Image (cartoon, grey):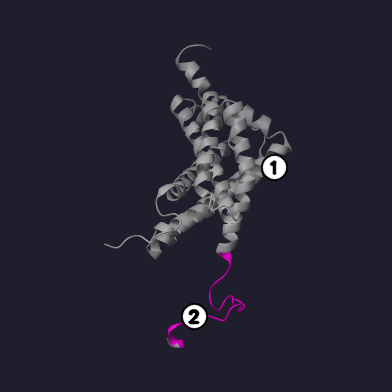
Amino acid sequence: MTSAEAPDIRAPRTQRTFGSSGRSNFELYSWLFMRISGLVLIFLVLGHLFIMNVLDGGVQRINFAFVAGRWSSPFWQVWDLLMLWLAQLHGGNGLRVIINDYAERDSSRMWLKAALYASMVLVLVTGTLVIFTFDPNIS
Amino acid sequence: MPTAPAGTLYRGREGMWSWVAHRITGALTFFFLFAHVLDTALVRVSPEAYDTVIATYKNPIVNLLEVALVGAVLYHALNGVRVILIDFWSKGPKYQQAMLWSIVAVWMLLMIPGVYFMLEHTVSAIFGGS
């Protein structure tokens, strides 16, 4: 075997070069983020579902007054804001991985991810705005 | 006839199907979240707009969808713990199959009383009572 057949193998412990090679640790951080955000979401989302669907009887009991009562407490505002951001980034990253796995053409991957990122921005901006500007006395 | 390489992770059986179920439950929950945030945003329009849209959800079919959502999210959460243990616990890969059956058991234990409380209203509305 000549050395020309394996030009990409570098010596062990070679410092990885960024930029020039176009490689980064993004996928490593994305993998780590899924596990850390997942652990936090277990408490936030299962707590939310348990209170809303099991204790409070689900959507049958929901109306504007219920939401107003809930968001009168800063505790639930912070809870919901944190849950919104972590769930949207966790789910959005999950869908990004699914698109990368199954959309084989470059153009389909590009368009599906453009739609995904647009929907994530829409949900995050709208959701954050609603939590911060909620007015219980709106007419 | 070539045979599949032996000893690979996630090739058929419980390991692969738990991963398939993790993807499906995760993707469905993401689409639910899109609808959930945008309809809740109607509280910023008017109480009437919000209450009108929420009223369309107050039927037995949406009640069953709520049960499906809770079941999907609960599976995704429990299997997520299993995935973390496979990744970070040195004995995780060895016990991945036992951990799957354990989370299925926990899922059943939590869903049986959960389904009862979630469907209580619909059942009493259909079969009389208050």
The residue at 47%/83% (across/down) is A7
Is residue A6 located in the magenta-colored stretch of the structure?
Answer: yes
> Closer to the observer: label 1 or label 2?
2
Q: Position of residue B20 (x, y in %)?
A: 43, 48
Q: Earlier in the sequence, mark 1 or mark 2?
A: 2
Which of the two residues, B73 or B35, is positioned nearer the viewer here?
B73
Mark 1 is on which residue type? Val
Which contiguous range is marked in magenta? Answer: A3-26
Which of the two residues, A53 or A122, is positioned nearer the viewer here?
A53
Q: Position of residue B18 (x, y in %)?
A: 46, 46
Q: Residues within 10 Å of mark 2 (few under 14, many from 20)?
A: few
Residue that numbered label 2 is attached to: A8
Question: Is disc 2 placed on a helix, strand or loop?
Answer: loop
The residue at 67%/41% (across/down) is A79
Gap in Å between the C-alphas at discs 1 and 2? 49 Å
Pick the quarter of the image with the N terminus of chain A: bottom left
Which residue is outermost to the top?
Answer: B129
Q: Is residue B120 above or below residue A121?
A: above
Marker disc for residue A78:
1
Q: Main secondary structure of the magenta part?
A: loop
Contact flag, marks 1 and 2 (Cβ < 8 Å)? no
Pick the quarter of the image with the C terminus of chain A: top right
- Chain letter of the residue beneath label 2 in the structure image: A
- Chain letter of the residue beneath label 1 in the structure image: A
In this rendering, the count of numbered labels is 2
Q: Quadrant of residue B3?
A: bottom left
Is residue B6 located in the magenta-colored stretch of the structure?
Answer: no
Mark 2 is on which residue type? Asp
